Image (cartoon, rainbow, N blue to C red):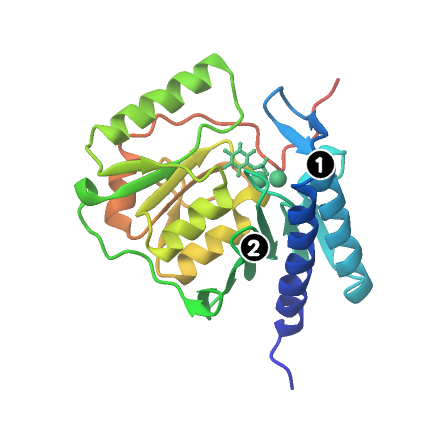
Amino acid sequence: MAEQWQDVLDHAVAVAQKAGKVVREALQSDRKVSTKSSSIDLVTQTDQKVEQLIIQSVKETFPAHRFIGEESVAAGEPCDLTDEPTWIIDPIDGTTNFFPLAFLLIMGVVYSCLEDKMFVARRGKGAFCNGKQLRVSDQKDIHCSIVATEFGSNRDGGAVEKIFSSLRKVVCLPVHGVRGAGSAAINLCLVASGCVEAYYEIGVHVWDVAAGALMVTEAGGVLMDVEGGALDMMSRRILAANNRHIAEQIVGQIQAFTPQRDDAPPQQQ
Ligand SMILES: O=P(O)(O)O[C@H]1[C@H](O)[C@@H](O)[C@H](O)[C@@H](O)[C@@H]1O
Ligand SMILES: [Mg+2]
Ligand SMILES: [Mg+2]
């Protein structure tokens, strides 16, 4: 008998490849950019087209499955994570070339379509890039560590102050360097691959991080809230690191704030 969920993972990888082709083609033509929550929260027709392509394809094969998709939520669909089999989809994450999918947080797929790198993780079975097993860095010294982060799309003055202040404190620990791939999913894959020791961000959404978070734990890393408690996928805050020691030193530098949760009820007009 085929292993449980293997058909779902195979489908996720196949649809990621199909979507990657659409994204690569669109890079030559699609320049129609619209805004969502703010002037720097952008969406293109390709984001919407790719999300629909994935949802249609999954529905045909697994009609009972549910979805949390970035563009569907932006269009008013609920962001409810229940015990039903649920696909969490970010059709394009970051600079128009990354593509994360998570299924009920037991498997994750991130396809970096320009590099043709397919990252796949399954709970309890490891994380892989193009078939090669991933392992986090074994660095234990924060001063020799590289930390990834992003500014995100929040331009509220108080939040920006805290983001800069946290970054200044992290830089001055000192750490060896700071990076940002422009994609939460890829930053998490960089932690899982051992290319950076840690990644933190406040303001991300569940679809930005669900797939990459599994990549990190399956590669031997840790996840927590930016204030050190347990990670809450809907809280829009994440810290991932190669080990707890590195994570806790970063926690000590972060000035946290609390964005509106992904699962908050819709705001009254
Ligand atoms: O909106 P996309 O490009 O799917 O996701 C990105 C967020 O918008 C941005 O705020 C965040 O910094 C980035 O990490 C994330 O991938
Ligand atoms: Mg995203
Ligand atoms: Mg996106």
Residue at left offset 62%, top offset 76%: 4
Amino acid found under the numbered disc labelled 1: Asp
Residue that label 1 marks: 30
What is the crowding at mark 1: few (fewer than 14 residues within 10 Å), some, or many (at least 20)?
A: few
| Mark 1 residue element | loop
Mark 2 lies on a secondary structure that is: strand
Q: Which residue is mark 2?
A: 111
69 displayed left or right of 111: right
* Disc 2 and disc 1 in contact, CB within 8 angstroms: no
Q: Residue 119: tell me if it is visible.
A: yes
Q: Which residue shows up at 22% across the image and 52% down it?
A: 139
Give how far apart the Cα atoms at labels 2 and 1 are.
Answer: 20 Å
Q: Which residue is at a point 61% across and 27% down the rendered structure image?
A: 41
Residue 5 sits in which quadrant? bottom right
Classify 160 as above or below 26.
Answer: above
Q: What residue is at 38 percent from the left and 20 percent from the top? A: 162
Residue 77 appears at what percent x and percent y? 76, 39
**Residue 119, position as x, y percentages in the image:** 50, 59
